[in-house]
Amino acid sequence: MSLQDSIDYLLAEACPSIKYRVKSEVLRQSPLTEEMIHLQQSILLEDKTVKTIMRAQQPNGWLGEGFHGGGGVEVGVRLLREKGVSSSHPVIKKALQAMRGSDESFAHELMRVGRILDQKGLGGSHLIRSVVFAYAGHEDEPFVREQIDLALHAFQSVLNKKLVSDITERYREKLVFKLGISWPSTYHLRLLAFTSQWRTPRNLETIVRSIGHLVELSPIPYILVREKAQLVAPPAVLMDDFNPDMSALDAKGWAMWFLRMELLSRLGVVAMIPELRDQVNHLAEILADNGGRFAKKLAHPYFTKWTAYMGLALESDWRSPERRALDLTFRSLIILHQSKFEETSSA
């Protein structure tokens, strides 16, 4: 299957954000061309969501009120970047500047819980902040590099755990991590997906083996973190099932799959893990059967409600089947492109 049909469809019909990202991420077009400058201006001046986020910037640069909660700086920066807003835009630069410093200056509502998760190597405030910087391409920051090393360690720790029971125990009828266990979270996955300097042959081999083992362990049960008598929920969204039955996915399941598989495809591991390759091939067949379009009728808040974990819709009106199809085709294209699908399928 060629991806050109999907590209042509999106460039003809999609919103400026999708057109901009197809041209920049898939076609590698320079942002300095007249066409790209025009698309960037359209995003900034016409997209209501973008304008709302930018209006929420406070005098100190902070976006919204919170850090990890809805409407805060994490979601704001993520959504601006998803919409195609340049990382050099003053709103993003000021927001990142406001996030520097100690826990007290950025962690806000997640300060205690985030500190617990950071200390246990399970993904807390400092890791989340590093992911936000990674969204904007700032992986050279010392605190980002530190978290990248911890993320690699978290994935490496998977390799010597044969069973889920090796990392868990029961506490108050709940499944919790054993003391001293390091385990990858959603934010470890995101951090590695949006950074590149760690990608040595040795590190890539470790990540391939780790993700492959997570596939073998799937589905992974919900596991809490115990801090004395307190139970804390780690950021484990998307980390439960790396090998779902594609034919049985409902709308919610597809939303989770798109979110997880886009990250995995950005890691560059899909072609080397048979189960992931099969999932991407299934996606390619759906597009091939429909002229390059994702034609399944899916609708769920996980697509349209942007939170710290969810959100995929770039088109403004998901009440329109045509707009939904454009968004889902775009996500499919990104996954297939990042997975190097055409090279994989011809091998």
Image (cartoon, grey):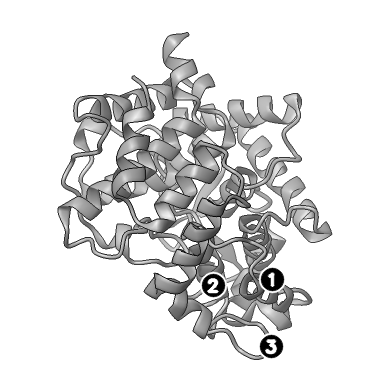
The residue identified by callout 3 is 60
The answer for how far apart the CA atoms under marks 2 and 1 are is 18 Å
Looking at the picture, how far across and down is residue 20, in whole percent? 47, 51
**Quadrant holding the N terminus:** top left
Q: Nearer the viewer, mark 1 or mark 3?
A: 1
The answer for how far apart the CA atoms under marks 2 and 3 are is 18 Å
Disc 1 and disc 3 in contact, CB within 8 angstroms: no
Looking at the picture, how far across and down is residue 226, in whole percent? 57, 63
Q: What's under tag 1, amino acid-wise? A: Lys
Relative height, residue 72 to residue 281 (above, below)? below
Left or right: 186 in relation to 292: right
* Foreground residue among 144 and 87: 87
Observer able to see residue 345: yes
Q: What's under tag 2, amino acid-wise? A: His
Left or right: 100 in relation to 186: right
Left or right: 212 in relation to 294: right
The residue identified by callout 1 is 93
The answer for how far apart the CA atoms under marks 1 and 3 are is 12 Å
Looking at the picture, how far across and down is residue 90, in whole percent? 66, 74
Looking at the picture, how far across and down is residue 343, in whole percent? 49, 17
User: Going by the picture, which residue comes out furthest to the top?
Assistant: 347
**Image quadrant of residue 208?**
top right
Q: Secondary structure at mark 1?
A: helix
Q: Earlier in the sequence, mark 1 or mark 3?
A: 3
Relative height, residue 17 to residue 192 (above, below)? below
Q: Which mark is residue 68?
A: 2
Observer able to see residue 70: no
Question: Which residue shows up at 48% across the image and 49% down it?
Answer: 21
